[in-house]
Image (cartoon, rainbow, N blue to C red):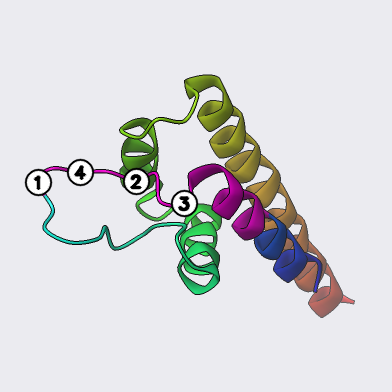
Amino acid sequence: MLLLLFVFIYALLGMQIFGGAFLDSDVVGTIRYNYDSFLNAFITSFIMLTTENWNTIMFYAFSGTTSQALIAVYFISCIFIGNWMLLNLFLAILLDSFT
């Protein structure tokens, strides 16, 4: 539940910071991973939590008009805190199975 709450908070935060800000001249239409709706933001935040293709999401974030310092703080905090929580969850399950 704590991990879902973390993804929920970062999805809402991402919607406020990056909603409609991802731009790319090479892609026709909308970008696949964005923060325009809550479902897309939740999926994008989960992708960042698992660190799968997070660099593409960060590239699109830097192509927008949002402050670079705010983008850096958002991505660094999401990846470090999220992975720390995921590691602790994995270790708790592993230690529980040993006892």
Q: Residue at x 65, y 62 (%)?
A: 7
Q: Between 97 and 4, which is closer to the camera in this rendering?
A: 4
Magenta residue span = 10-26
Q: Which of marks 2 and 3 is nearer the N terminus?
A: 2
Residue located beneath label 3 in the image: 51
Residue located beneath label 2 in the image: 22
Q: Between 11 and 4, which is closer to the camera in this rendering?
A: 11
Left or right relative to 37: residue 63: left
Left or right relative to 41: residue 23: left
From mark 4 to mark 2, how far is it between C-alphas?
Answer: 7 Å
Residue located beneath label 4 in the image: 24
Q: Quadrant of the N terminus?
A: bottom right
Q: Earlier in the sequence, mark 1 or mark 3?
A: 1
- Looking at the picture, how far across and down is residue 43, in whole percent? 48, 68
Q: Earlier in the sequence, mark 4 or mark 3?
A: 4
Indicate which label's residue lies in the foreground, 2 or 3. Answer: 2
Q: Quadrant of the C terminus?
A: bottom right
Disc 4 and disc 2 in contact, CB within 8 angstroms: yes
Q: Which amino acid does label 2 sit on?
A: Phe
- Callout 1 environment at 10 Å: few (<14), some (14 to 19), or many (20+)? few
From mark 1 to mark 3, how far is it between C-alphas?
Answer: 24 Å
Say what secondary structure mark 4 lies in. loop
Indicate yes or no whether the magenta region holds residue 12.
yes
- Callout 2 environment at 10 Å: few (<14), some (14 to 19), or many (20+)? many
Residue 3 tag number = none
- Callout 3 environment at 10 Å: few (<14), some (14 to 19), or many (20+)? some
From mark 1 to mark 2, how far is it between C-alphas?
Answer: 12 Å
Left or right relative to 16: residue 53: left
Q: What residue type is labelled 4?
A: Asp
